[in-house]
Image (cartoon, rainbow, N blue to C red):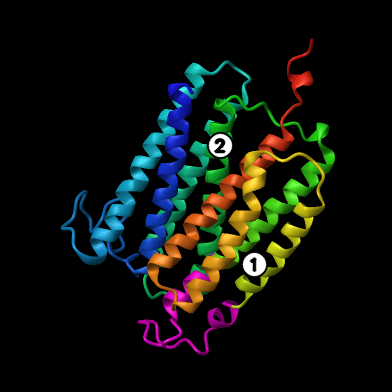
Amino acid sequence: MTRITRYAWFTLLFNVGVILLGALVRATGSGAGCGRSWPTCQGEVVPELSGATAVEFTHRAASGIALVLVAVLVVWAWRAVPKGEPARTGAAMSLAAIVGEALIGGMIVLAEWVADDVSTARVVAVPLHLVNTLFLLAALTLTAFWLSGGRRLSPKDHPGVWGWAVAGAGAIVLLAATGAITALADTLFPKSGSGAAGSGEAHFLTDLRVVHPILAVVGASIGWWVSGRSEAPRSRAGRALPLLVGLMLLTGVLNVALGVPVWMQLVHLLLADGLWITYVLASAEALQVPVEVAQPV
């Protein structure tokens, strides 16, 4: 494995850590820790670190490091990889996605869609932010895949696989978006009714909580059924998908049974990120140009 390949995988893993920090900010209600100030915190480059300010500042600092890591990956890829190679495109997409992450995060802070805010705008912004996050992870995963020797994708050589891959990706994105809404509802309106936002019995978020688990069970059942009927050879990533889906369902049940503790929310999110990365890898491996086409005799 080359140095740039190891760096690409490290950058991907670091961004997963940043995503978990972002979830910690939301779950602990620390989104207002830096006040209505961005990209500075409390109007300072390094504020006094305590409580919510420390949590939010840590997330922002890690996000800044992630941006630098991705920028370095782009420069390195464009210098080390020949023109026309897909790794260049993947790195460029990664940079666009992480810049989008920063801009969306800044908008959320400046609009004060944080802490105890229960506005419809926040309910819309949170899943949209997550969709962009999934795009970032997909771009970084593909970049690392290509730098690891993976071949460019060719949907025309795999028309049937391409259709199922797109449908599966759409289902995962939809499921993740509803999960983000459920997590927001659990933070703002805990079932104990002791949250700072009040009991929330009349808020539409409390009714939306049930959508995510229903979709999760339906989606997992369809995924297992399709996987069981497929006769195509599967890569290691493809074989791991059913197990990850099962772990997601298990941790989802435990999350609810335990009263949605912060640590379990983070475990569930970590598995969700792992599932998405694994799905992107499995799809890329199945859709890459056949060896005989990539390397004609």
Is 205 covered by the magenta stretch? Answer: yes
Question: Is 59 situated left or right of 74 in this image?
Answer: left
Q: Residue at x 46, y 85 (%)?
A: 191
| Mark 1 and mark 2 residues within 8 Å of each other at the beta carbon | no
- Where in the figure is residue 217, as x and y percent of width and height? 67, 69
Amino acid type assigned to the residue bearing label 2 in the image: Met
Q: Secondary structure at mark 1?
A: helix
Q: CA distance from mark 1 to mark 2?
A: 29 Å
Query: Residue at (62%, 48%) from the top-left corner?
Result: 240
User: Which mark is on residue 216?
Assistant: 1
- Secondary element type, mark 2: helix
Residue 76 shows in this picture: yes
Q: Residue 171 in the image: state x and y as whole percent.
A: 69, 58
Vertical comparison of 87 with 172: above or below? above
Number of residues whose C-alpha sits closer than 10 Å to that of mark 2, classed few (under 14), some (14–19) or many (20 or more): many
- Where does the image place residue 226, in percent across and percent down from the top left? 78, 55
Question: Pointer 2: what residue?
Answer: 93
Question: Magenta stretch?
Answer: 180-209
Q: Nearer the viewer, residue 113 or 161?
A: 161
Q: Horizontally, is 118 left or right of 181 in the view?
A: left
